[in-house]
Amino acid sequence: MILKAGVTGFGKNRLLTLMEITNVLKNINFPYIYSNILEPKMDTNYFSIDIINKKTGIDFKLLINGIYFIMAGVTTKSKWMELIFIDLPEDFIKQTKNDEIIFLNKSILNTCVPTNEIEVLKREEKEQIKYWGSKTYGEIIFNGYD
């Protein structure tokens, strides 16, 4: 089971704080640098951080769910409700890895969620999933519901 109650950001959940996020990000070192930390807003349930590999010039966005330490990568061309998931580089994962963090790869994020897994979510979360037509782990865990 990947989904947990509250993962969508709906309901009375404790949000991760900017301090908790920066404590994870401080482990990032060369060749990666991060910038532009955007906190969850009214229409997103995740933190978004710009990452660039200074050696290769490859850049991506790191998404962190606002409730749980679930991380994923998306292209810089990704937009609200149109996230293009990528596999995070292994050397980047090693820098940020700890026991609290769950890293999801592109394959999992693009997989349709089994109905029985949605059952663990709160009523308001199920309503939003139905309303927005979310089907995949990526669409539910990193959503732009308003």
Image (cartoon, rainbow, N blue to C red):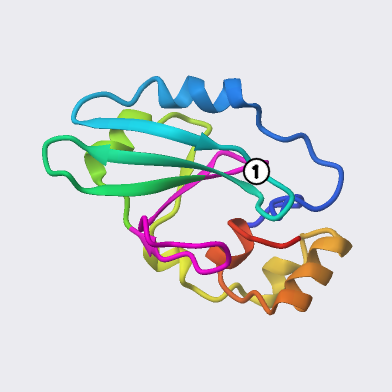
Name the amino acid, label 1. Pro
Residue 8 visible in image: yes
Q: Is residue 143 above or below residue 115?
A: above
Q: Position of residue 75 (x, y in %)?
A: 35, 58
Quadrant assignment for the C terminus: bottom right
User: In terms of image quadrants, where is residue 66?
Assistant: top right
Write the start and end of the magenta stretch as one range. Answer: 64-86
Q: Is residue 120 magenta?
A: no
Q: Percent x, y for residue 45?
A: 66, 50
Q: Quadrant of the N terminus?
A: bottom right
Q: Residue 114 in the image: x percent, y percent?
A: 62, 75
* 31 w.r.t. 81: above or below: above
Q: Residue at x 29, y 30 (%)?
A: 33
Return the residue nearer the eye: 123 or 25: 25
Label 1 crowd bin: few (<14), some (14–19), many (20+), radius 10 Å: some
Q: Secondary structure at mark 1?
A: loop
Residue that label 1 marks: 40
Q: Is residue 72 inside the magenta stretch?
A: yes
Q: Position of residue 20 (x, y in %)?
A: 58, 23
Write the residue at 69% across / 46% down: 41
